[in-house]
Amino acid sequence: GDSVTQMEGPVTLSEEAFLTINCTYTATGYPSLFWYVQYPGEGLQLLLKATKADDKGSNKGFEATYRKETTSFHLEKGSVQVSDSAVYFCALTAGAGNQFYFGTGTSLTVIP
Amino acid sequence: EAQVTQNPRYLITVTGKKLTVTCSQNMNHEYMSWYRQDPGLGLRQIYYSMNVEVTDKGDVPEGYKVSRKEKRNFPLILESPSPNQTSLYFCASSGFRKNNEQFFGPGTRLTVL
């Protein structure tokens, strides 16, 4: 069945460091891919998405490219800030009305 | 304000005492869903619904029931809660025209003693 695997955390970085959180997926067909962020004590918020191969999603300095050949959707940011400290989830769905699959989440802490 | 609301936000109960967690959205979304979040396991989908009177099981439906009698509401029912259902629960909704972006509620922390 469909699934998402993301790198385990926790990840601790200094402010202005480069961030990569790896995400790979298994899916039949052509899923849509997402990154969600969860700040402490809150629900999840959509960070970015990509709906087809080679699409790049971007938001708030974060980017991820839908790579069909490597079945990956790695999250990157060039310079992290303390305010980026949160848990990040990779997710996929096969399409409208279908089941969603989330990764286990990666906790990021950015220290000044 | 567009939002997904859940009630209650916190609940402590005892084994076997039926409970309902309500979920409501004001965005006219077709798709609604329930997840549970557990440490090390991420979010796992319990049930989802594509529209009124249409529901489907997710990965972990055992011990839960749902209903979708109205488009805006999607309650989660635990007929006989057990301690292994202690978790953080999220409701979410999305509209089919928005590339499936899901909007999440604030969460319900449930403890079953």
Image (cartoon, coloured by chain):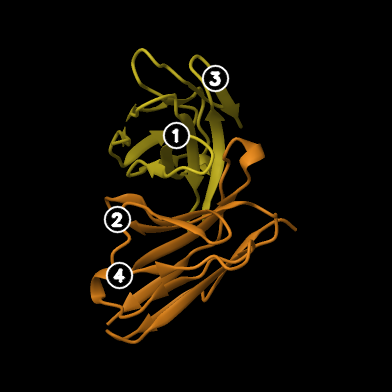
Cα separation, mark 3 vs mark 2, equals 30 Å
Cα separation, mark 1 vs mark 3, equals 18 Å
Cα separation, mark 1 vs mark 2, equals 25 Å
Q: Position of residue A23 (x, y in %)?
A: 36, 29
Residue B39: image tag:
2
Residue beneath the point at 28% across and 38% down: A8
**Which comes before the other along the chain, label 1 or label 3?**
3
Label 4 SS? loop
Point out the frontmost of discs 1 and 3: 1
Q: Where is residue A106 in the image (x, y as percent from the top left)?
A: 36, 41
Q: Which chain does tag 3 point to?
A: A
Mark 3, residue position? A56
Answer with the quarter of the image where residue A68 lies. Answer: top left
Question: Considering depth in this image, is A87 or B55 the residue closer to the camera?
Answer: B55
Residue B63: image tag:
4
Q: Where is residue B73 in the image (x, y as percent from the top left)?
A: 59, 66
Residue beneath the point at 39% across and 69% down: B65
Point out the frontmost of discs 4 and 3: 4
**Chain A, colour shown:** yellow
Residue type at numbered disc 1 = Ala
Q: Which chain does tag 4 point to?
A: B
Residue under disc 1 on the same chain as residue under disc 2: no
Answer with the quarter of the image where residue A73 lies. Answer: top left
Residue type at numbered disc 3 = Lys
Label 2 SS? loop
Cα separation, mark 1 vs mark 4, equals 26 Å
Mark 1, residue position? A94
**Chain B, colour shown:** orange
Residue under disc 1 on the same chain as residue under disc 3: yes
Residue A63: image tag:
none
Q: In this view, does B59 lie above or below A84?
A: below
